Image (cartoon, helix red, strand yellow):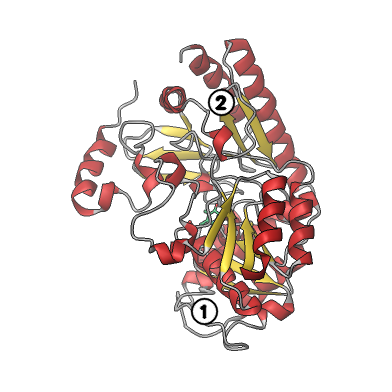
C-alpha cells in the first residue's frame, strides 16, 4: 500500500481552517472514502503528491490541462508575462488575441466577454438572455452542472449529484421557481414544456454532452429538436461548453454535432490552467452587455494578463495540424483498453466517450440521463477508485464525474492504466 501520511497530516490541518478541508467539495474524497491527496507538483501526464507518490492523471484539474501539466510553451509564456506585472485593470492586446482565437473556432459567437470562472460565464449568459428576451424563467436539465450560482443549483450535477444534494439550502424558493428542469434526452418532455411555457422562458441552458454526471451523450435528434423549438419561440439557446469546449472537438460539441447555439459558455481549457471563463454569442444579444447595453456584468480581474497568456498559448498549441487526431487516437486506445479489460475481468460496466472525455459506469443499464446514471454502483466505483489510486492512476473521486485524457498521455501510460484497471476490476 502507498504511504499517504503527509497528505493525511495536511488534511487534518486544513479541516480546522477550511470547510471540509477543501476549497471545492468534490476534492474531498467523501464519495470514495479516505483522505484527499495533497499535490506538490505536476508535469505532463503525471501528478505528484506530498508523500512522493506519482500518478497518471485523468483528472487534469477537472478538465483544463488538455496539453498535459506544465506544458513548456505555456510555462515559458507565463514566465515572460509575469515579469510585466500581473494585473492592470485596463485593457491589453492579450484580451483581443484570445477573443480572436476563440471567435474563429466558435463561429456561433460574434462577440465574447472574458470572466474568471465557468460559474461567472453561465450566470452572466443567463442574465444577458433574460435582458434580451425580457422573460424570467430558464430551463435546465437534470444532472447538468452549470456552476454554483443560485438559480442553477437546482437538480445540478457534479458535487451536487455525487453527494445527493440536488437542491442546495440557501437558494431562495423565489429563485428556484424560475428554474424549470427536464430530464436530459427526453424529447417528448421538452416539447410539451416549451409549447406550454415558452412565453415566460428566456433561455434553455444545456451541457451538450453531460460531463457532470459522468459522460452522457445526446441521443440522435435531441439537440436538433432543442434547437428547432427554441428558435421557433424566441428562446435563447445557451450551450454550456465549459467542459466540452476544445474537448469534444476543437470547436466543441457545437462543431461535433453541427448545432449553432445563440450563446456559448466556455471555461476550463480556455484558461490553460489559470482561472478563466468566457461567454459569448450573437451580436444582438451581446450588445445588451454593459457598457454597450444595459445588462450589467463586470470583473476586477477579468481578462487578466496571466490568464489570457495561458489561454492563448493553450489554444495555439491545440490549433496545430494533427493535434486532435493525436488526441482521438489516444482516447480511442484508452476506450478499447478499458472496455476490453472490463470484459476480461467479467465486470459489468458501461463506457461512454466524447472526444477526450469519458466515463466508465458500474451498471448494466444504458446511461442516457440523470436517473440511469444513478443506477451505477457508487460503492463498487469507490473500491475501483482506491485500487487504481494504489496502482498509481488518479481518477476523479466520484462515479459521477468525467475522466479526461491529455496530449501528454503516452501509449505506455495508457497500457499501464489498462493493466491497472484489469487488476482492479478483477478484485472489486
Ligand atoms: C466546471 C463547469 C462549470 C463551472 O465552472 P467553474 O470554473 O468551476 O466555476 C460550469 N459548467 C460546466 C459544464 C462545467 O463543467
- Residue located beneath label 2 in the image: 417
Is residue 68 left or right of 320 when viewed as pictured?
Answer: left
Distance from the alpha carbon under mark 2 to that under mark 1: 44 Å
Looking at the picture, tell me which residue is in the foreground, 153 or 258.
Answer: 153
Q: State if disc 1 and disc 2 touch (CB < 8 Å).
A: no
- Residue 117 sits above or below residue 211 on the image: below
On the image, the x and y values in percent for residue 347 come to 57, 15
Looking at the picture, tell me which residue is in the foreground, 391 or 382.
Answer: 382
On the image, the x and y values in percent for residue 121 come to 55, 66
Q: Quadrant of the N terminus?
A: top left
Q: Is mark 1 within 8 Å of ligand 1?
A: no
Label 2: state its secondary structure: helix
User: For mark 1, does the 10 Å Cα neighbourhood hold few (<14), some (14 to 19), or many (20 or more) residues?
Assistant: some
- Residue 381 sits above or below residue 48 on the image: above
The residue located at (74%, 35%) in the rendering is 329
Looking at the picture, tell me which residue is in the foreground, 174 or 164.
Answer: 174
Q: Earlier in the sequence, mark 2 or mark 1?
A: 1
Label 1: state its secondary structure: loop
On the image, the x and y values in percent for residue 169 come to 34, 55
Q: Is residue 216 visible?
A: yes
On the image, the x and y values in percent for residue 10 come to 24, 43
Is residue 101 left or right of 164 when viewed as pictured?
Answer: right
- Residue located beneath label 1 in the image: 297
The residue located at (40%, 45%) in the rendering is 165
Amino acid at each position: 500500500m502507498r504511504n499517504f501520511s503527509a497528505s493525511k497530516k495536511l488534511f487534518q490541518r486544513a479541516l480546522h481552517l477550511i470547510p471540509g478541508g477543501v476549497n471545492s467539495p468534490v476534492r474531498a474524497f467523501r464519495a470514495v472514502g479516505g483522505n484527499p491527496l495533497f499535490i506538490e507538483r505536476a508535469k505532463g501526464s503525471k501528478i505528484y503528491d506530498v508523500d512522493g507518490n506519482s500518478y497518471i492523471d485523468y483528472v487534469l484539474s477537472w478538465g483544463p490541462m488538455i496539453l498535459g501539466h506544465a506544458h513548456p510553451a505555456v510555462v515559458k509564456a507565463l514566465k515572460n508575462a509575469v515579469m510585466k506585472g500581473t494585473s492592470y485593470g485596463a485593457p491589453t492586446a492579450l484580451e483581443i488575441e484570445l477573443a480572436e482565437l476563440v471567435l474563429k473556432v466558435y463561429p456561433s459567437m460574434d462577440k465574447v466577454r472574458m470572466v474568471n470562472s465557468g460559474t461567472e460565464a453561465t450566470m452572466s449568459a443567463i442574465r444577458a438572455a433574460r435582458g434580451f428576451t425580457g422573460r424570467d424563467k430558464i430551463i435546465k436539465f437534470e444532472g447538468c452542472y452549470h456552476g454554483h450560482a443560485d438559480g442553477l443549483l437546482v437538480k445540478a450535477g457534479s458535487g451536487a449529484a455525487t453527494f445527493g444534494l440536488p437542491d442546495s439550502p440557501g437558494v431562495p424558493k423565489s429563485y428556484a421557481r424560475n428554474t424549470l428542469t427536464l430530464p436530459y434526452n427526453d424529447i417528448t418532455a421538452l416539447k410539451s414544456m416549451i409549447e406550454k411555457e415558452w412565453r415566460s422562458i428566456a433561455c434553455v441552458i444545456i451541457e451538450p454532452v453531460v460531463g457532470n454526471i459522468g459522460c452522457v451523450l445526446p441521443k440522435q435528434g435531441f439537440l436538433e429538436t432543442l434547437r428547432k423549438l427554441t428558435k421557433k419561440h424566441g428562446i435563447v439557446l445557451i450551450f454550456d461548453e465549459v467542459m466540452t469546449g476544445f474537448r469534444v472537438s476543437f470547436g466543441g460539441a457545437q462543431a461535433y454535432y453541427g448545432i449553432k447555439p445563440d450563446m456559448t459558455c466556455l471555461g476550463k481549457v480556455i484558461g490553460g490552467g489559470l482561472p478563466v471563463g468566457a461567454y459569448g454569442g450573437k451580436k444582438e444579444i451581446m450588445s445588451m452587455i454593459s457598457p454597450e447595453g444595459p445588462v450589467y456584468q463586470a470583473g476586477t480581474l477579468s481578462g487578466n494578463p496571466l490568464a489570457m497568456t495561458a489561454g492563448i498559448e493553450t489554444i495555439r498549441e491545440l490549433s496545430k495540424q494533427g493535434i486532435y487526431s493525436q488526441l482521438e487516437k489516444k482516447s480511442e486506445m484508452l476506450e478499447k483498453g478499458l472496455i476490453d479489460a472490463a470484459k476480461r475481468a467479467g465486470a459489468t460496466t458501461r463506457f461512454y466517450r466524447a472526444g477526450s472525455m469519458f466515463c466508465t459506469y458500474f451498471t448494466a443499464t444504458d446511461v442516457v440521463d440523470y436517473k440511469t446514471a444513478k443506477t451505477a454502483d457508487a460503492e463498487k466505483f469507490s473500491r475501483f477508485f482506491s485500487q487504481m489510486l494504489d496502482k498509481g492512476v488518479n481518477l476523479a473521486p466520484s462515479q459521477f464525474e468525467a475522466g479526461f485524457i491529455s496530449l501528454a498521455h503516452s501509449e505506455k501510460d495508457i497500457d499501464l492504466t489498462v493493466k491497472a484497471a484489469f487488476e482492479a476490476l478483477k478484485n472489486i
